């Protein structure tokens, strides 16, 4: 996982056993903003797909909401991804400079 977040419905409570803690971490939803976002995403999913499972989750929202976990990249992995992206950006900038210099001498 590189950046971003995911909300996972952990129906049977085994999600933590199935993740790589070196790459991601599971956290509680961070208050009203996360909960509102999650509920809106589930509502949108129902509207787009007609999913009976998602509809059932909305009908029993307080219980269903308690079984969702928020998944984030592990901070060290996020830092590594940022370094990779910055390295790629520097390479592109260097290549552009080399091309510009070559064009100036052509």
Image (cartoon, rainbow, N blue to C red):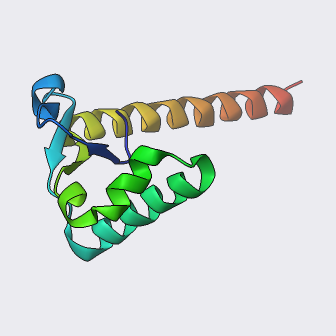
Give the residue at the far right of this rendering. 106
Q: Nearer the viewer, residue 88 or 23?
A: 23
Q: Nearer the viewer, residue 42 or 94?
A: 42
Residue shown at 59% from the left, 46% from the top: 49
Position of 94 with respect to 61 (left or right) is right
Position of 45 with respect to 15 (left or right) is right
Q: Nearer the viewer, residue 59 or 30?
A: 59
Total labels: the figure holds: 0
Q: Does 10 appear above or below 44?
A: above
Q: Position of residue 101 (x, y in %)?
A: 75, 31
Q: Nearer the viewer, residue 44 or 52?
A: 52
Q: Position of residue 64 (x, y in %)?
A: 24, 55
Q: Quadrant of the C terminus?
A: top right
Residue shown at 34% from the left, 63% from the top: 59
Position of 92 with respect to 72 (left or right) is right
Q: Position of residue 44 (x, y in %)?
A: 53, 59
Q: Quadrant of the N terminus?
A: top left
Residue shown at 12% from the left, 31% from the top: 14
Q: Quadrant of residue 103?
A: top right
Residue shown at 79% from the left, 25% from the top: 102
Q: Quadrant of residue 16?
A: top left
Q: Does 28 appear above or below 93?
A: below
Q: Does 83 appear above or below 20?
A: below
Position of 96 with respect to 94 (left or right) is right
């Amino acid at each position: 996982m590189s950046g971003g977040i995911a909300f996972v419905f952990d129906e049977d409570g085994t999600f933590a056993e199935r993740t790589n803690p070196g790459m991601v971490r599971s956290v509680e939803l961070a208050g009203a903003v996360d909960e509102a976002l999650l509920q809106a995403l589930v509502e949108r999913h129902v509207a787009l797909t007609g999913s009976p499972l998602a509809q059932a989750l909305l009908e029993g929202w307080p219980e269903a909401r308690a079984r969702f976990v928020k998944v984030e990249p592990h901070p060290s992995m996020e830092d590594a991804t940022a370094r990779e992206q910055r390295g790629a950006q520097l390479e592109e900038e260097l290549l552009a400079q080399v091309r510009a210099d070559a064009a100036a001498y052509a």
